[in-house]
Amino acid sequence: MFDATDDPFLTASEIANQLPVSRQAVHHRLEQLREKGLVDKKKTGARGAGWWATVAPRLAPDVAERADAVDREDAVALESLEAEFDSA
């Protein structure tokens, strides 16, 4: 869920709105994930909290294999690509 958004954090209600479960069920699961160190939270008010993932999503096996096979010598810096597209 966290890797499908550009938001820096999500509330339990926002997550529950995307799933067929209650906000309370999402909150319970988020607390379990927090105990495992996979997510963290910060209180945003008297009763609210923002949650975010503390680990990056895993690549699919075929994507990871392709990434490992890339010749790093052929890599181009992001700044170079941005400059090239900005000048076009």
Image (cartoon, helix red, strand yellow):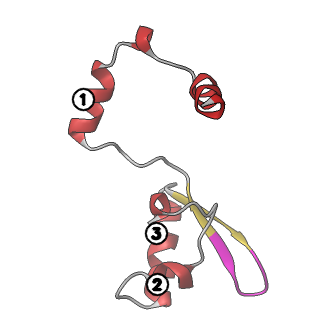
Is residue 80 or residue 84 the one in the foreground? 84
Would you place residue 23 above or below residue 58 in this image? Answer: below
Give the number of the mark in front: 1 or 2: 1
- Magenta-drawn segment: 44-50
- Is 10 on the left-hand or right-hand side of 36? right
Would you place residue 63 above or below residue 28 in this image? Answer: above
Q: Which residue is mark 1?
A: 65
- CA gap between label 1 and label 2 equals 34 Å
Name the kind of residue labelled 2 in the image: Ala
Give the number of the mark in front: 3 or 1: 1
- Is 51 on the left-hand or right-hand side of 30? right
- Relative image position of residue 46 (x, y in whole percent): 78, 86
- Is 66 on the left-hand or right-hand side of 8? left
Q: Quadrant of residue 63?
A: top left
Mark 1 lies on a secondary structure that is helix
Is residue 57 or residue 29 the one in the foreground? 57
Q: Quadrant of residue 41?
A: bottom right
Q: Of label 2 and label 3, which has the lower sequence position?
A: 2
Position of the C terminus by quadrant: top right
State whether the magenta stretch is mostly helix, strand or loop.
loop
Residue shown at 52%/63% (left/top)?
5
- Relative image position of residue 36 (x, y in whole percent): 47, 57
Q: Of label 1 and label 2, which has the lower sequence position?
A: 2
Name the kind of residue labelled 3 in the image: Gln
Q: Which residue is mark 2?
A: 16
